[in-house]
Amino acid sequence: MVMIFKKSIILAVCLIVAAGVVIGVCCGVAAASTAATTEKVIVIDAGHGGIDAGVHGVETGAKESDINLAIAKKLKGYFAVAGFKVVMTRNDNGGLYGLSTSGFKMRDMKKRKQIIEDSKADMVISVHQNSCPIPSRRGGTVFFDKTSECGKALADAIQNSLNNMEECVKKNTALAGDYYMLKCTENPSVIVECGFMTNADDDRLLSTDAYQDKIAYAIFKGAVSYYS
């Protein structure tokens, strides 16, 4: 079963990358392109952690930090099975700030930046959940640095994949932002807000293992299609 699953993921990578190859190019070149993508270092950042829980589900009361980590781990699994090198900024429920004293949030973000820089990341995907005073707002939204063309390209690719999910009731547009976590590398970096925890429907979905897996796979597909 594990081998079948692994083969299916590798096949998905091949199909996504091959789709970006000009018609008429031989299969050998497409395979070479796929091999090149699997040498990339992908940093997956599960937002928040420790005393910084982020937002809470309006109905479930779930912590954003826990959902971020769950999706990030599933996303890591997809990339790893496909042969990419994956680095996680955090692997448990703790924060990266050390002591929970004044200034812990900036210490936390600087530690994440250090991990990104030390790993020489080719791509950074930061996983978060959204909130809004308007409870009807829902769905995934991807943010990119406003000065990064490659970041916008990655954000558009992942946004398109999220919009194609069967649960998507409203197609959102990737948005430019001026966030610290988007400025830790010159390579493409995005923040994926998987849904609105202030929306009851999104909150219920995001709290289930099955939907967390679907979101992770959609992010993975979009990220791989960027390399095509």
Image (cartoon, grey):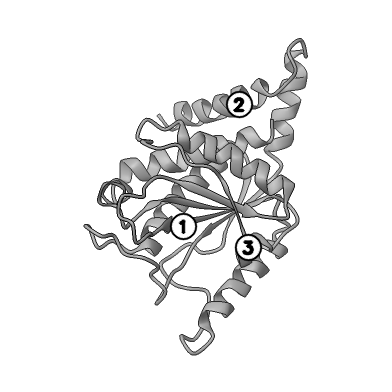
Q: Give the distance between the C-alpha atoms of the residues marked 3 and 2, in whole angstroms.
A: 30 Å
Task: Tell which tag, 3 or 2, sits nearer the viewer.
Answer: 3
The structure residue drawn at horizontal position 36% and vertical position 47%, both measured from the top left corner, is 138
Rendered location of residue 136, percent (x, y): 31, 49
The residue closer to the viewer here, 75 or 104, is 104
Task: Say whether residue 81 is visible.
Answer: no
Q: Residues within 10 Å of mark 1 (few under 14, many from 20)?
A: many
The residue closer to the viewer here, 177 or 60, is 177
Q: Earlier in the sequence, mark 1 or mark 3?
A: 1
Q: Decide: is 104 above or below 14.
A: below
The structure residue drawn at horizontal position 75% and vertical position 56%, both measured from the top left corner, is 186
| Residue on which the image places disc 1 | 128
| Residue on which the image places disc 2 | 16
Q: Give the distance between the C-alpha atoms of the residues marked 1 and 3, in whole angstroms.
A: 16 Å
Quadrant of image for the N terminus: top left
Residue extending farthest left: 59
Q: Earlier in the sequence, mark 3 or mark 2?
A: 2
Amino acid residing under circle 3: Asp
Quadrant of image for the C terminus: top right
Q: Give the distance between the C-alpha atoms of the residues marked 2 and 1, in whole angstroms.
A: 25 Å
Task: Say whether residue 173 is visible.
Answer: yes
Q: Secondary structure at mark 2?
A: helix
Position of 97 with respect to 114 (left or right) is left
Rendered location of residue 30, percent (x, y): 72, 21
Q: Secondary structure at mark 3?
A: loop
Q: Earlier in the sequence, mark 2 or mark 1?
A: 2
| Residue on which the image places disc 3 | 178
Indicate which disc residue 75 carries. Answer: none
Position of 209 with respect to 59 (left or right) is right
